Amino acid sequence: MADERKWDIEVIDDLFDDRDSALIKRTPLSIHVNIDSWYWLLDGKGDFTVRSCYRRLQGECSDDHSKLWKKIWAMKLPSKVTHLVWRLCKGCLPTNAALVMKHVNIEAGCPWCHREAETSVHVMFLCDFAKTVWLTAGMAHLVNCFSYETPSAVLQKVFEQGTKDQCVEIAMLCWSIWNRRNRWVWDHVNGSVFGVKNIATHLLREWTEAQIKEESRKIRGEVGDRVWSPPPTGWLKINIDAAVFLDGTIGVGAVIRDDRGCFIGA
Ligand SMILES: [Zn+2]
């Protein structure tokens, strides 16, 4: 019952089995009194249009997504940040709301503000803490969104409107907000808004400097005559080395890099 901000227990008990009924009743309600309305997901304003329907049937909407993936993978970012943004867009982040959908017996609410269900969009853009981060970074106007939007729709809009530098900063801040959320949930460490921004800035600077050093080493030929070449797009390359020491022990090492030369693991 939207006008009273409470569940219609009688209807829920009547329509759903005990397990689903209990899960629905545990879902936090919006703090706003909104009247339910229809929303067409394929249109930015939520209005049904024949054009959007036709585009979906023609498969154009999936093409839009492939453009988003290309944009994400082409951004110059640390690989863990690229991976986080990709997981965010795919709806793979283990937020409380996502875990409840997978039948994990926990509360779906946001552990920080306790006002809304903890969805990816809430954590990244709508929670009070996240909003302050975006305001402080001067990018609140770019990430302005609604709780019914999917993370991929929000980021698609953001990456189209933002400059190259803004897109990189937004990706870095998403990673830092998620990082800070996990430290709060799992270690009870309360990171500040400025801490979130500083960690993002620091990581990006370190990574960029490392990339520049690597490039200049390659140009100076310090890696020898043999220059590492990247694998084909979408592939990973493993380089291994081994040594036998005088005491008879053997050492083996391996490093995995992607097609852009970014470090994946060792
Ligand atoms: Zn929240």
Image (spheres, grey):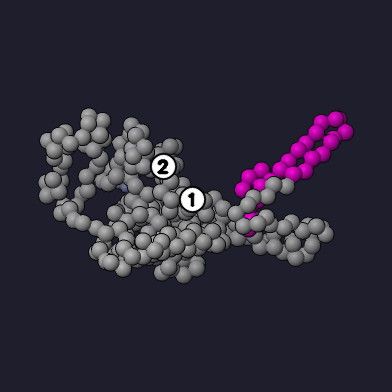
Span highlighted in magenta in the image: 240-266
Which label was assigned to residue 37? none
Q: Indicate if the residue with disc 1 has its beta carbon within 8 Å of ligand 1.
A: no
Give the amino acid type for the residue marked by disc 2 in the picture: Pro
Residue 33 point in image, percent of width and height: 16, 52
Q: Quadrant of residue 261?
A: bottom right
Q: Indicate if the residue with disc 2 has its beta carbon within 8 Å of ligand 1.
A: no
Q: Where the N terminus falls, by quadrant?
A: top left
Q: Nearer the viewer, residue 193 or 48?
A: 48
Q: Residue shown at 69%/59% (left/top)?
A: 214
Residue 204 point in image, percent of width and height: 55, 58
Q: Where the C terminus falls, by quadrant?
A: top right
Give the amino acid type for the residue marked by disc 1 in the picture: Leu
**Left or right: 56 with respect to 242?**
left
Q: Residue furthest right?
A: 246
Give the mark nearer the N terminus: 1 vs 2. 1
Residue 128 point in image, percent of width and height: 31, 52
Q: Mark 2: which secondary structure?
A: loop
| Circle 1 crowding by C-alpha within 10 Å: few under 14, some 14–19, many from 20 | many
Q: Mark 1: which secondary structure?
A: helix
Q: Residue shown at 74%/56% (left/top)?
A: 228
**Residue 243 counted in the magenta span:** yes
Q: Quadrant of residue 98?
A: top left
State the CA–CA distance, disc 1 to disc 2: 11 Å
Residue 49 visible (yes or no): yes
**Left or right: 22 with respect to 205?**
left
Q: Residue shown at 46%/49% (left/top)?
A: 87
Q: How many numbered markers are drawn?
A: 2
Q: Which residue is mark 1?
A: 84
Q: Which residue is mark 2?
A: 94
**Residue 44 counted in the magenta span:** no
